[in-house]
Image (spheres, rainbow, N blue to C red):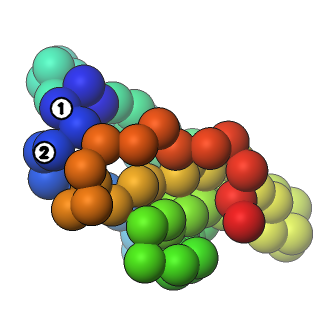
């Protein structure tokens, strides 16, 4: 995202589907960063301190939950400061 003071929304929908996996979609809108209909998984949000939160996305691969993606969100209420790539 490019607006450091904007609201961040994280939406995942890969918790499972009784009909099975699906990869048929309508055309992907510009606001949609990623699509995947071939894996199930879940996400976690860890509050590190009053300035940082860590989002992690895990996928189920052959019965094992594997980390697939993560990113660090920084609180800008104290003014802009670059997020460190370090999670602590």
Q: CA distance from mark 1 to mark 2?
A: 5 Å
| Residue at 24%, 25% in the rendered image | 2
**Hey, which quadrant is residue 80 in on the image?**
top left
Q: Secondary structure at mark 1?
A: loop
Query: Where does the image place residue 88, in percent across and percent down from the top left?
Result: 72, 66
Q: Quadrant of the N terminus?
A: top left
User: Which residue is disc 2 drawn over?
Assistant: 6
Residue 29 sits above or below residue 34 on the image:
above
- Mark 1 and 2 residues: CB-CB less than 8 Å, in contact? yes
Residue 38 vs residue 67, the one in the foreground: 67
Residue 30 sits above or below residue 77 on the image:
above
Residue 86 sits above or below residue 28 on the image:
below
Residue 6 vs residue 13, the one in the foreground: 6
| Residue at 41%, 55% in the rendered image | 74
Residue 25 vs residue 41, the one in the foreground: 41
Q: Secondary structure at mark 2?
A: loop
Residue farthest toward the front in the current orientation of the protein: 78
How many numbered markers are drawn? 2
User: Which residue is disc 1 drawn over?
Assistant: 3
């Amino acid at each position: 995202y490019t607006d450091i003071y904007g609201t961040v929304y994280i939406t995942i929908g890969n918790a499972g589907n009784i009909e099975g996996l699906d990869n048929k979609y309508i055309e992907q809108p510009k606001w949609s960063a990623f699509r995947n209909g071939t894996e199930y998984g879940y996400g976690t949000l860890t509050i590190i301190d009053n300035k940082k939160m860590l989002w992690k996305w895990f996928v189920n691969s052959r019965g094992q939950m594997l980390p697939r993606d993560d990113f660090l969100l920084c609180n800008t209420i104290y003014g802009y400061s670059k997020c460190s790539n370090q999670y602590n």
